[in-house]
Amino acid sequence: MRVLIMSDMEGVSGIVTWDQVTGGKSLYEEGRRLYTEEINAAVRGAKAAGATEIVAVDCHGAGGDWTFNSFVPELLDPDCEWVAHHPWSRYTEL
């Protein structure tokens, strides 16, 4: 089974203020960690359900160089293909 996770920071558990989702703001790093760990939880669930291929795409436009680059690389689950800092529209055509 293949699983595609299209993700955005708004709606992540623990995200309660715009400063957590806006690149360069004081709480943005905290928001990035929450975002990455929530997607990791989805990856673990997909693996437990039998997924053989998992792709997670960062669709969060945080502004500036942070746009589509909000995952925290050192926290990413190695069993998942992570797509960040890349135009993701090609994944919507799968």
Image (cartoon, grey):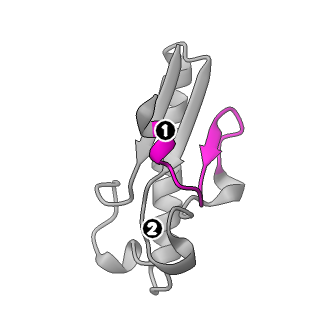
Q: Which of 47 and 22 is in front in this view?
A: 22
Q: Which residue is located at x 54 percent, y 30 percent?
A: 44
Q: Is mark 1 on a helix, strand or loop?
A: helix
Is residue 47 found left or right of 81 in the rendered image? left
Q: Which residue is located at x 53 percent, y 55 percent?
A: 87
The answer to whether one can see residue 40 in this image is no
The answer to whether one can see residue 49 in this image is yes
Amino acid type of the residue tagged 1 in the rendering: Tyr
**Span shown in magenta:** 76-91
Tag of residue 43: none
Q: Which of 73 and 83 is in front in this view?
A: 83
Residue designated by label 2: 31
Alpha-carbon span between mark 2 and mark 1: 24 Å
Per the picture, the main secondary structure of the magenta-coloured stretch is loop
Is residue 80 found left or right of 8 in the rendered image? right
**Residue 74 place in picture, x, y as percent:** 71, 57
Task: Inspect the magenta stretch and tell me whether residue 5 lies in it.
Answer: no
Query: Which quadrant of the view contains residue 53?
Result: top right
Residue designated by label 1: 91
